[in-house]
Amino acid sequence: MFELIQLRCFVAVAEELHFGRAAARLNMTQPPLSRHIQVLERIVGLELLARSSRSVRLTAAGVVFLAEARRIVELSDSAVATARAAAEGQRGMVALGFTAASGYSFLPSFFGRMRIDMPDVKLLLKEMVTGEQLESLQTGRLDIGLLRPPVRGTELASMRVLTERFVVCRHSSIPEHARPRTLADFDGLPIIMYAPDKARYFHDLVTGLFANAHASPQLVQHVAQIHTILTLVGAGHGYALVPEASTHLHPDNVVFSELENSDPIVELHAAWREDNVNPALRLLLTNLRRWTRELGGAEDDQQA
């Protein structure tokens, strides 16, 4: 069977129709080039090039063989390029977990950066709450998760990718002058609260804020998802504190307002296993650090 170097030599001569130019193109001398062509013709059992002292031309068999030889050489080059790209993380797949709230603002910009910087890496998207993501990271079903801190688990590392403020949401029938502006203003008001089991991060955060402000709102519902909270606010069940990314949603009968004297304390983290050897993940982490630095949200990696 012929070898790839023999096909490369034949293609070069067939395209240049000159042994000297073909040898220079392949960065080799003319004698070994000629030997490769002779061996190829012997293996094929046909004359592929008609030579004379003045010219080189393709035979009828050579014309047909050239098309196939080009295809084989191109496939070989493509296979090498694809393998190298995969080894460098430029190709492949990353299983990405995310919370519903992270999709309001962070994910759209994240996807945009992926299309520009890593266009040949596919994302396998899995919407999960934080606890499910941590379990899936540990078992290898996820490569990376976008979740709420703290990140607990052996062999997990994380970095902050986004920090945002809470905003107030109220029913549209409540006038601006009557809405709560500070945490203390929520004292005695009906509020939709985060569930302590399925939304532990938000529950503890909001509960701590009210405690520090010496406010005791009237808790009317405990739910896990922000879009459910907004639905209940829109139905007139009470007020809520939600991350400012929620303002990208447009629920009926809901108005968002600034919470005065509030700091950006709502964090979104990326988490992954330190021993994950997926090259695409390693490149993604490098890019993610740069993207979040540009957005002002990143901090040093943390070992859980």
Image (tube, grey):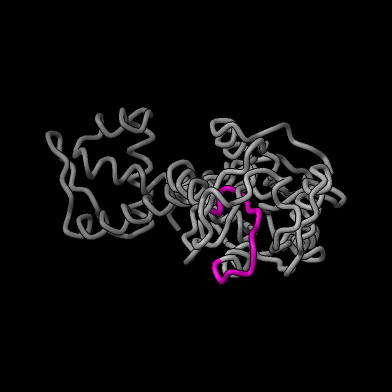
Residue 297 sits in which quadrant?
top right
Q: In this view, which residue lies farthest toward the front?
A: 177
Q: As rendered, which of 256 and 52 lies closer to the eye?
A: 256
**Quarter that holds the C terminus:** top right
Count of marks placed on residues: 0
Q: In this view, does 213 lie above or below 135?
A: above
Does 263 appear in magenta?
A: no
Q: Image point 15% across, 45% down: which residue?
A: 57
Give x and y (percent) for residue 115.
44, 48
Q: Image point 38% across, 57% down: which residue?
A: 43
Q: As rendered, which of 100 and 224 lies closer to the eye?
A: 224
Give x and y (percent) for residue 252.
47, 66
Q: Is residue 140 visible?
A: no
Left/right placement of residue 69 relative to residue 110 reads left
Q: Image point 71% across, 52% down: which residue?
A: 186
Give x and y (percent) for residue 216.
80, 54
The span picked out in magenta is 234-246
Does 240 appear in magenta?
A: yes
Q: In this view, which residue lies farthest toward the right?
A: 154
Q: Can residue 207 be seen in this view?
A: yes
Give x and y (percent) for residue 167.
60, 48
Q: As rendered, which of 82 and 158 lies closer to the eye?
A: 158
Left/right placement of residue 197 relative to residue 183 reads right
Q: Image point 64% across, 46% down: which residue?
A: 166
**Quarter that holds the N terminus:** bottom left
Left/right placement of residue 70 relative to residue 253 reads left
